[in-house]
Image (tube, rainbow, N blue to C red):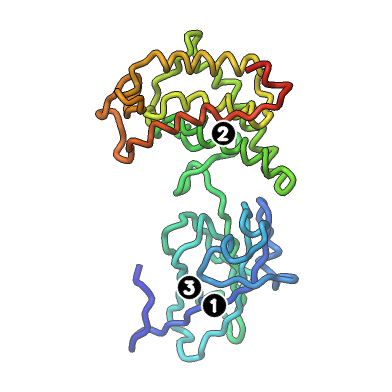
Amino acid sequence: MLYPQLNEARALLDLSGVWQFALGNEEFDEEKMLFPLKNPETMAVPASYNDQKAQAKFRDHYGYAYYQTAFQIPKMPKGQRLVLRFGSVAQAAVVYLNGKLLLRHKGGFLPFEAQIGELARSGENLLAVAVDNRIDFSTLPVGNESGCAMFADSLPGGDKDYYNPFVMVTYGMVYAKFMYQEDPHRCRRFTERALAFGRDYIYWFSQDGSSFAYGRSMTYRFAQAAYFAVCALCGVEAFPLPVLKGILARHLVYWLNQPIFDNAGILTIGYAYPNLQMSESYNAPGSPYWALKAFCTNLDETEKKYF
């Protein structure tokens, strides 16, 4: 695909600039492709619309968004090959020209183009682009699909690790605790995910307090139990508090019986013993201290009796 350039053989019309813009939802709205947008916002192109406005509705938008611009084609190139080229649209695009479907494209980091000679006309042309920023198992970066696993770690053949329980799920619960008044829909979703996750995750822990030595990120050791501590912190009733206490206590006792400290009492890099061979390239002396996530509990006086 030739990069567009202006020379003695080719003309170039750059459509970058300020376009008309409207947010949509998760359903494609063809009407926004056929007619000028009603009460549109303005949006700079090229750029991410999530980053250009201060309001949360732009920053957090998920689904379709609609761009429109009007342009004229000079008389000189009429009858010649006319090509409309996009540098990239993340993640998928539907393009209409003068009310007619021109193309569909999926691939957020690739350029694409189409000839427009049959749809272009004298005078003003209306170009409409629907952008779908949702990610799933078929996109780069990879994301979730509806009805499938919550996070991309579940990709068939993909890397698996403990980031789901001690990062993604736990941070979701913390967000839900402190942001519910401002963002109730997302907070409810995060809490529902955490509850569903816990129903399976509890079976990763045995009676002696140990858990699976599983996948990457094992240098973080008893961070494995952070999910249960954050349930108590955030009031997510995945299990009764005595159950949470039992899992955490047995897990910590298990780890305190392992040779994981050096002579100065500093956590070493490794799993059940110091072992740099199993570490990852980004691990450093501070890495094992993610284990302290297991202590992020803040109970009121009525709850402390369980701990």
Kindly identify which numbered label has been placed on residue 17. Answer: 1
If you read the primary sequence from the N terminus, does the residue marked by circle 1 or circle 2 appear first? 1
Q: Is 1 located above or below residue 264 in the figure?
A: below
Q: Is residue 206 left or right of residue 269?
A: right
Disc 1: CA contacts within 10 A as few (<14), some (14-19) or many (>=20): few
* Separation (CA) of disc 2 from disc 3: 45 Å
Q: Quadrant of residue 195?
A: top right
Quick one: SS at disc 1?
strand
Amino acid type, residue under disc 3 in the picture = Leu
Disc 2: which residue: 170
Name the outermost residue toward the top: 207
Disc 2: CA contacts within 10 A as few (<14), some (14-19) or many (>=20): many
Is residue 121 in view?
yes
Amino acid type, residue under disc 1 in the picture = Gly
Quick one: SS at disc 3?
strand
Mark 1 vs mark 3, foreground winner is: 1
Q: Residue at x 32, y 29 (%)?
A: 269
Residue toward you, 118 or 254: 254
Q: Residue at x 74, y 45 (%)?
A: 181
Amino acid type, residue under disc 2 in the picture = Thr
Is residue 157 in view?
no
Disc 3: which residue: 84
Quick one: SS at disc 2?
helix
